[in-house]
Amino acid sequence: MEKRDESHLIIAMAEGSEQAFNEIYELYARRLFAFCLKYTKSKENAEEIMEDTFVWLWKNRSTLEEADSVKPLLFLRAKHYLINAYRKVINS
């Protein structure tokens, strides 16, 4: 997908379009899941972190209007969730 097309999806999602959110989910869910699985080694944990990341995206959609792509944001947010999950494991 071209950056221009994704920026239209981001704008639509920022305005509350669930269809645009679903298209963004379809674009990145598989890659984000693989990224999380690489570090968690657990399908359940990877799926949970991926879902939390997309919930975060939906909740913060109104702040994304100027973004050309959500990919860096998604992977950075997932990285934060991975670090927090790792800390929980260490501390328990």
Image: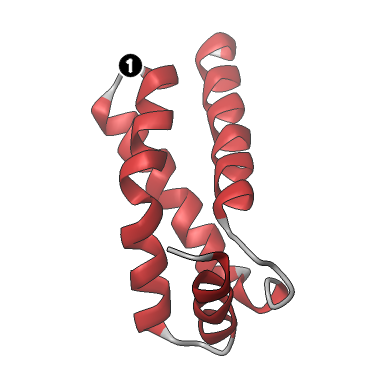
Q: Is residue 86 above or below residue 49?
A: above
Query: Looking at the figure, which quarter contains the N terminus?
Result: bottom left
The percent coordinates of residue 74 (x first, y second) are 55, 49
Task: Categorize mark 1 by other alpha carbons within 10 Å: few (<14), some (14-19), many (20+).
Answer: few
Tell me the amino acid under the disc marked 1: Lys
Question: At x 37% / y 61%, what residue is drawn?
Answer: 25
Q: Is residue 48 left or right of residue 59?
A: left
Q: Nearer the viewer, residue 65 or 53?
A: 65
The percent coordinates of residue 70 (x first, y second) are 58, 59
Question: At x 57% / y 89%, what residue is drawn?
Answer: 15
Mark 1 element type:
loop
Q: Nearer the viewer, residue 44 or 14?
A: 14
| Residue underneath mark 1 | 41
Question: At x 49% / y 78%, what residue is drawn?
Answer: 9
Q: Is residue 3 above or below residue 43?
A: below
The percent coordinates of residue 49 (x first, y second) are 43, 40
Question: At x 56% / y 70%, what residue is drawn?
Answer: 59
Q: Quadrant of residue 20?
A: bottom left
Q: Is residue 15 left or right of residue 45?
A: right
